Image (cartoon, rainbow, N blue to C red):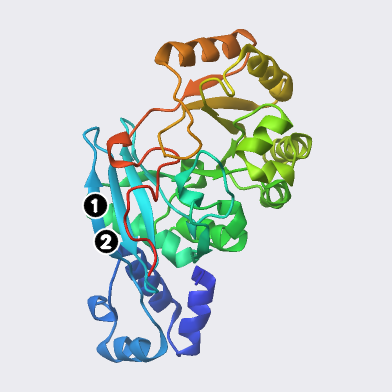
């Protein structure tokens, strides 16, 4: 429930508004039962047990990388499971969460899509990843990336409700400026997101600067080609004033050529954006080869010479299959 909906629910139980605030706080602290909510009366706790259901996830498995990255497998109430990843940085601990159980986008380089989509996650199941990963990790989560399993904009309404709940001061109070949302390029949903004028960071998975190559890597491009996608991105920037981060998975001999540099420059010229280059990670899909460090540096240097703002994604969690494109790769049981 949103905070306002919870207030209405509690009012329906003849409870004053401050009780809704107490309950909302308990839920965002990771209470697993109403009995833990000790500042609520026993009678109210018994009433809530008869009227509401708590279904916190079980943290079933944990993997720790030598670089400090930690990956959790969380079992949901229906037997499905999701992965989320804590990544330590100097400025803050960042959490990558999943928005769907599985994915139907079919990107050729991504393991998360291999078995398709089981179902969308609820707003509560997204929040639970933040709450219980933070409890398990034992340190504050300072930023979020919606870049785990699933396509966030394919679960639009639930993700929007999650984004509203997570910033509420009565709960976790996490500013949208500390949240990034990644999409494979659902242009119609980018238009809808733009209308909301949220202050999140939008990351668009580009991965190729021309339609035929992008369609071979990302089936979504057959529905929303680059011209349609770029129009949506320009409108998003115009309405929000926010810079877009274009993610570009670099694959040796595929999208790392001088012609790709030229086309990418032409595609993004004049846009308020930056390019986040991600050397492809091993997933067993597509037989894609990772570029050498020198080749990555040459590609980035060529883009910078043309005036583009370029960064290289820090490689974290590769030894536990927690890097970009690797979630659902490790043989953990994700469905019943």
Q: Is residue 227 left or right of residue 81?
A: right
Of helix, strand and loop, which one carries label 1?
strand
The quarter in which the C terminus is drawn is bottom left
> What is the x, y in percent for residue 35?
24, 81
Q: Nearer the viewer, residue 146 or 173?
A: 146
**Labelled disc at residue 62:** 1
Q: Quadrant of residue 260?
A: top right
Q: Is residue 241 visible?
A: no
Q: Which mark is residue 248?
A: none
Residue 66 x/y as whole percent: 21, 34
* Numbered disc 2: secondary structure: strand
Label count reads 2
Residue 92 coordinates in the image, percent (x, y): 33, 37
| Residue at x 36%, y 64% (from the top left corner) | 28
Query: Is residue 249 toward the left or the right of residue 239 in the image?
Result: left
Other residues around mark 2 within 10 Å, as few (<14) / some (14–19) / many (≥20): some
Q: CA distance from mark 2 to mark 1?
A: 8 Å
Residue 280 vertical placement versus 83 (above, below): above
* Position of residue 241 measured from the top left corner of the image (x, y, whole percent): 67, 35
Q: Is residue 220 visible?
A: yes
Q: Which residue corresponds to the image point at 55% horizontal and 43% vertical from the top-left?
A: 182
At a point 25% along the width and 32% down the height, the residue shown is 67
> Residue 177 or 162: which is nearer the viewer?
162
Quadrant in which residue 41 is drawn: bottom left
Asked where in the image residue 299 lies, by quadrant, the reply is: top right
Residue occupied by mark 2: 59
Q: Are marks 2 and 1 in contact (CB under 8 Å)?
A: yes
């Amino acid at each position: 429930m949103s905070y306002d909906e919870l207030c209405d629910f509690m009012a329906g139980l003849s409870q004053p508004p401050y009780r809704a605030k107490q309950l909302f706080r308990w839920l965002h602290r990771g209470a697993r039962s109403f009995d833990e909510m000790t500042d609520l009366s026993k009678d109210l706790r018994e009433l809530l047990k008869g009227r509401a259901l708590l279904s916190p996830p079980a943290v079933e498995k944990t993997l720790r990388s030598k670089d400090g990255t930690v990956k959790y497998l969380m079992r949901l109430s229906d037997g499905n499971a999701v992965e989320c990843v804590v990544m330590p940085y100097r400025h803050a601990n960042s959490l990558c969460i999943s928005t769907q159980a599985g994915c139907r986008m079919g990107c050729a380089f991504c393991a998360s899509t291999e078995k398709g989509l089981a179902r969308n996650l609820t707003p509560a199941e997204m929040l639970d990843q933040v709450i219980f990963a933070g409890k398990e990790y034992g340190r504050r989560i300072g930023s979020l990336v919606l870049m785990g399993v699933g396509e966030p904009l394919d679960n639009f309404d639930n993700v929007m409700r999650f984004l509203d709940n997570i910033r509420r001061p009565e709960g976790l109070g996490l500013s949208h400026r500390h949240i990034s949302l990644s999409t494979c390029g659902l242009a119609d949903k980018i238009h809808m997101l733009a209308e909301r004028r949220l202050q999140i960071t939008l990351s668009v998975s580009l991965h190729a600067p021309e339609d035929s190559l992008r369609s071979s890597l990302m089936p979504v491009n057959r529905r929303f080609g680059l011209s349609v996608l770029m129009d949506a991105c320009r409108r998003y920037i115009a309405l929000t004033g926010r810079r877009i981060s274009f993610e570009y998975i670099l694959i040796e001999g595929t999208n790392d050529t001088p012609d790709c540099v030229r086309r990418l420059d032409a595609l993004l010229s004049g846009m308020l954006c930056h390019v986040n280059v991600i050397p492809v990670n091993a997933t067993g899909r597509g037989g894609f080869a990772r570029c050498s460090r020198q080749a990555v540096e040459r590609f980035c240097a060529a883009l910078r010479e043309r005036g583009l703002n370029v960064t290289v994604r820090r490689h974290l969690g590769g030894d536990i299959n927690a890097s970009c494109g690797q979630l659902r790769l490790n043989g953990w049981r994700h469905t019943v």
